[in-house]
Image (cartoon, helix red, strand yellow):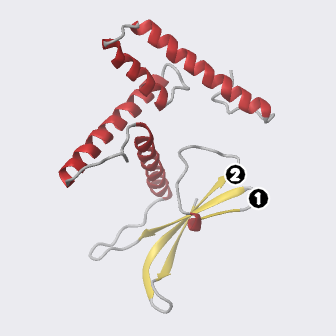
Protein backbone atom coordinates (compact mmCIF):
# COMPACT_ATOMS: atom_id res chain seq x y z
CA UNK A 1 0.00 0.00 0.00
CA UNK A 2 1.37 3.39 -0.99
CA UNK A 3 0.11 6.92 -0.30
CA UNK A 4 1.08 10.15 -2.07
CA UNK A 5 -0.38 13.64 -2.02
CA UNK A 6 -1.44 14.73 -5.54
CA UNK A 7 -3.05 17.76 -7.16
CA UNK A 8 -6.18 16.82 -9.09
CA UNK A 9 -7.62 18.58 -12.11
CA UNK A 10 -11.27 19.49 -12.42
CA UNK A 11 -11.13 20.64 -16.02
CA UNK A 12 -8.39 20.83 -18.62
CA UNK A 13 -6.52 23.80 -17.16
CA UNK A 14 -8.18 24.35 -13.78
CA UNK A 15 -6.64 22.52 -10.85
CA UNK A 16 -8.74 20.96 -8.15
CA UNK A 17 -8.08 20.32 -4.48
CA UNK A 18 -5.13 18.38 -3.14
CA UNK A 19 -5.97 14.76 -2.43
CA UNK A 20 -4.27 11.61 -1.23
CA UNK A 21 -3.69 8.99 -3.92
CA UNK A 22 -3.70 5.54 -2.31
CA UNK A 23 -2.44 2.60 -4.37
CA UNK A 24 -2.89 -0.96 -3.11
CA UNK A 25 -1.23 -4.00 -4.62
CA UNK A 26 -2.61 -7.52 -4.27
CA UNK A 27 -1.25 -10.77 -5.76
CA UNK A 28 -3.43 -12.16 -8.55
CA UNK A 29 -3.52 -15.58 -6.86
CA UNK A 30 -5.01 -14.00 -3.73
CA UNK A 31 -8.78 -14.45 -4.19
CA UNK A 32 -10.21 -13.04 -0.97
CA UNK A 33 -13.95 -12.38 -1.01
CA UNK A 34 -13.53 -9.23 1.10
CA UNK A 35 -11.26 -7.50 -1.41
CA UNK A 36 -11.96 -3.89 -2.28
CA UNK A 37 -14.55 -3.27 -4.97
CA UNK A 38 -13.46 -0.54 -7.35
CA UNK A 39 -14.46 0.46 -10.85
CA UNK A 40 -12.53 -0.86 -13.83
CA UNK A 41 -11.05 2.60 -14.36
CA UNK A 42 -9.50 2.43 -10.89
CA UNK A 43 -8.09 -1.08 -11.30
CA UNK A 44 -5.00 -2.18 -13.20
CA UNK A 45 -3.01 -5.39 -13.26
CA UNK A 46 0.21 -6.80 -14.60
CA UNK A 47 1.38 -10.41 -14.77
CA UNK A 48 1.64 -10.87 -10.99
CA UNK A 49 -0.30 -8.13 -9.18
CA UNK A 50 -3.59 -6.26 -9.27
CA UNK A 51 -3.48 -2.57 -8.38
CA UNK A 52 -6.36 -0.49 -6.98
CA UNK A 53 -6.36 3.31 -6.91
CA UNK A 54 -8.28 5.48 -4.43
CA UNK A 55 -8.51 9.26 -4.00
CA UNK A 56 -9.21 10.68 -0.55
CA UNK A 57 -9.69 14.38 0.25
CA UNK A 58 -7.08 16.25 2.25
CA UNK A 59 -9.11 19.39 3.00
CA UNK A 60 -12.81 20.26 3.18
CA UNK A 61 -14.48 23.63 2.95
CA UNK A 62 -13.77 24.76 6.51
CA UNK A 63 -11.84 21.90 8.06
CA UNK A 64 -8.37 20.68 7.15
CA UNK A 65 -7.77 17.01 7.80
CA UNK A 66 -4.63 15.66 9.42
CA UNK A 67 -2.47 13.26 7.47
CA UNK A 68 -3.99 9.75 7.70
CA UNK A 69 -1.80 6.80 8.53
CA UNK A 70 -1.53 3.82 6.21
CA UNK A 71 -3.24 1.65 8.83
CA UNK A 72 -6.20 4.04 8.96
CA UNK A 73 -6.49 4.12 5.17
CA UNK A 74 -6.32 0.31 5.02
CA UNK A 75 -9.03 0.07 7.69
CA UNK A 76 -11.33 2.40 5.75
CA UNK A 77 -10.76 0.57 2.44
CA UNK A 78 -11.44 -2.79 4.14
CA UNK A 79 -14.58 -1.41 5.82
CA UNK A 80 -15.88 -0.18 2.48
CA UNK A 81 -15.36 -3.61 0.97
CA UNK A 82 -17.14 -5.31 3.91
CA UNK A 83 -20.09 -2.91 3.65
CA UNK A 84 -20.37 -3.54 -0.09
CA UNK A 85 -20.30 -7.31 0.49
CA UNK A 86 -23.02 -6.97 3.15
CA UNK A 87 -25.24 -5.04 0.75
CA UNK A 88 -24.71 -7.71 -1.92
CA UNK A 89 -25.71 -10.36 0.62
CA UNK A 90 -28.76 -8.31 1.53
CA UNK A 91 -29.82 -8.10 -2.09
CA UNK A 92 -29.31 -11.82 -2.62
CA UNK A 93 -30.52 -13.28 0.66
CA UNK A 94 -33.22 -11.05 2.16
CA UNK A 95 -34.63 -9.21 -0.85
CA UNK A 96 -33.26 -5.77 -0.12
CA UNK A 97 -33.66 -4.82 -3.79
CA UNK A 98 -37.14 -6.32 -4.17
CA UNK A 99 -39.31 -3.50 -2.90
CA UNK A 100 -42.56 -2.17 -4.32
CA UNK A 101 -43.52 0.76 -2.16
CA UNK A 102 -45.49 3.93 -2.79
CA UNK A 103 -44.04 6.24 -0.15
CA UNK A 104 -40.65 7.06 1.29
CA UNK A 105 -41.87 5.84 4.65
CA UNK A 106 -42.61 2.41 3.16
CA UNK A 107 -39.18 2.32 1.52
CA UNK A 108 -37.50 3.20 4.82
CA UNK A 109 -39.45 0.47 6.61
CA UNK A 110 -38.46 -2.10 3.98
CA UNK A 111 -34.78 -1.08 4.11
CA UNK A 112 -34.74 -1.09 7.92
CA UNK A 113 -36.22 -4.59 8.10
CA UNK A 114 -33.88 -5.84 5.36
CA UNK A 115 -30.81 -4.43 7.11
CA UNK A 116 -31.90 -5.94 10.42
CA UNK A 117 -32.37 -9.32 8.70
CA UNK A 118 -28.91 -9.12 7.07
CA UNK A 119 -27.35 -8.07 10.39
CA UNK A 120 -29.01 -11.03 12.13
CA UNK A 121 -27.97 -13.54 9.44
CA UNK A 122 -24.35 -12.32 9.38
CA UNK A 123 -24.22 -12.43 13.19
CA UNK A 124 -25.56 -15.98 13.24
CA UNK A 125 -23.09 -16.97 10.51
CA UNK A 126 -20.17 -15.64 12.55
CA UNK A 127 -21.48 -17.33 15.67
CA UNK A 128 -21.91 -20.62 13.81
CA UNK A 129 -18.40 -20.44 12.31
CA UNK A 130 -16.94 -20.89 15.77
CA UNK A 131 -18.31 -24.44 15.67
CA UNK A 132 -18.34 -25.10 11.89
CA UNK A 133 -15.76 -23.01 9.98
CA UNK A 134 -17.31 -23.53 6.53
CA UNK A 135 -20.81 -22.34 7.47
CA UNK A 136 -22.18 -19.86 4.94
CA UNK A 137 -24.96 -17.30 5.06
CA UNK A 138 -27.33 -19.26 2.76
CA UNK A 139 -26.94 -22.30 5.01
CA UNK A 140 -27.89 -20.24 8.07
CA UNK A 141 -30.93 -18.93 6.21
CA UNK A 142 -31.85 -22.48 5.16
CA UNK A 143 -31.54 -23.74 8.75
CA UNK A 144 -33.66 -20.87 10.08
CA UNK A 145 -36.32 -21.46 7.43
CA UNK A 146 -36.48 -25.13 8.47
CA UNK A 147 -36.74 -24.06 12.10
CA UNK A 148 -39.60 -21.67 11.28
CA UNK A 149 -41.39 -24.42 9.34
CA UNK A 150 -41.29 -26.54 12.51
CA UNK A 151 -44.63 -24.96 13.50
CA UNK A 152 -46.38 -26.81 10.67
CA UNK A 153 -44.07 -29.78 10.36
CA UNK A 154 -42.18 -30.95 13.42
CA UNK A 155 -38.89 -32.43 12.18
CA UNK A 156 -37.05 -31.60 15.42
CA UNK A 157 -33.71 -29.95 16.01
CA UNK A 158 -31.77 -33.17 15.35
CA UNK A 159 -33.13 -33.56 11.81
CA UNK A 160 -32.44 -29.87 11.06
CA UNK A 161 -28.85 -30.32 12.25
CA UNK A 162 -28.52 -33.45 10.08
CA UNK A 163 -29.82 -31.59 7.03
CA UNK A 164 -27.42 -28.67 7.57
CA UNK A 165 -24.55 -31.12 8.21
CA UNK A 166 -25.41 -32.93 4.95
CA UNK A 167 -25.33 -29.59 3.10
CA UNK A 168 -21.94 -28.74 4.65
CA UNK A 169 -20.54 -32.12 3.57
CA UNK A 170 -21.81 -31.56 0.02
CA UNK A 171 -20.09 -28.14 -0.01
CA UNK A 172 -16.81 -29.65 1.21
CA UNK A 173 -16.98 -32.38 -1.45
CA UNK A 174 -17.66 -29.76 -4.12
CA UNK A 175 -14.66 -27.70 -2.94
CA UNK A 176 -12.46 -30.78 -2.89
CA UNK A 177 -13.58 -31.78 -6.40
CA UNK A 178 -12.96 -28.22 -7.63
CA UNK A 179 -9.36 -28.28 -6.40
CA UNK A 180 -8.86 -31.90 -7.50
CA UNK A 181 -9.91 -31.23 -11.10
CA UNK A 182 -7.65 -28.17 -11.31
CA UNK A 183 -4.76 -30.06 -9.68
CA UNK A 184 -4.08 -27.32 -7.15
CA UNK A 185 -3.77 -27.25 -3.38
CA UNK A 186 -6.87 -26.12 -1.48
CA UNK A 187 -6.55 -23.06 0.79
CA UNK A 188 -5.33 -23.71 4.32
CA UNK A 189 -8.83 -23.26 5.67
CA UNK A 190 -10.04 -26.31 3.71
CA UNK A 191 -7.10 -28.64 4.35
CA UNK A 192 -7.83 -31.43 6.76
Contact (CB < 8 A) between labels 1 and 2? yes
Which quadrant would residue 171 be assigned to in this image?
Answer: top right
Q: Which residue extends farthest bottom? A: 13
Residue 125 place in picture, x, y as percent: 44, 28
Q: Give SS at disc 2.
A: loop
Residue in the picture at 66% in, 46% down: 30
Question: 119 or 149: which is nearer to us?
Answer: 149
The answer to whether 35 appears left or right of 11 in the picture is right
As drawn, 180 above or below 26: above
Q: Is residue 19 above or below residue 119?
A: below
Name the image quarter holding residue 123: top left
Q: Is residue 80 left or right of residue 96?
A: right
**Which residue in the structure is indicated by mark 1?**
47
**Closer to us: 152 or 1:** 152
Secondary structure of the residue carrying numbered label 1: loop
Q: Residues within 10 Å of mark 2 (few under 14, many from 20)?
A: few
Q: Is residue 160 positioned above or below 104 on the image? A: above
Where is the N terminus found, in terms of image quarters? Answer: bottom right
Total labels: the figure holds 2
- Mark closer to the chain start, 1 or 2: 2
Where residue 122 sits in the image (x, y, percent)? 41, 34
Image coordinates of residue 6 in percent, x first then y, are 51, 77
- Which sits in the foreground, 142 or 130? 142
What residue is shown at x 29% (from left), y 48% (from top)? 100
Packing grade of label 1 (10 A; few <14, some 14-19, many >=20) is: few
User: What residue is at 58 percent from the left and 68 percent from the top?
Assistant: 41
Position in image of residue 116 (x %, y %): 30, 37
Which is more toward the observer, 143 or 49?
A: 143
Vertical side of 67 occupied by 18: above or below: below
Q: Residue at x 42, y 66 (%)?
A: 67
Numbered tag placed on residue 170 in the rendering: none
Q: Which mark is residue 28?
A: 2
Amino acid sequence: MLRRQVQTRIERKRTGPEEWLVVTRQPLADARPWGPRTSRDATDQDAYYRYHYYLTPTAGCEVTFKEPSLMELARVIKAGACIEASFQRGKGEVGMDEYQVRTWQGWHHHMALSLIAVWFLIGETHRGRQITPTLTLPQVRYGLSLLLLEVFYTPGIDSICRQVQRQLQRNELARFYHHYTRKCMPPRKLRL
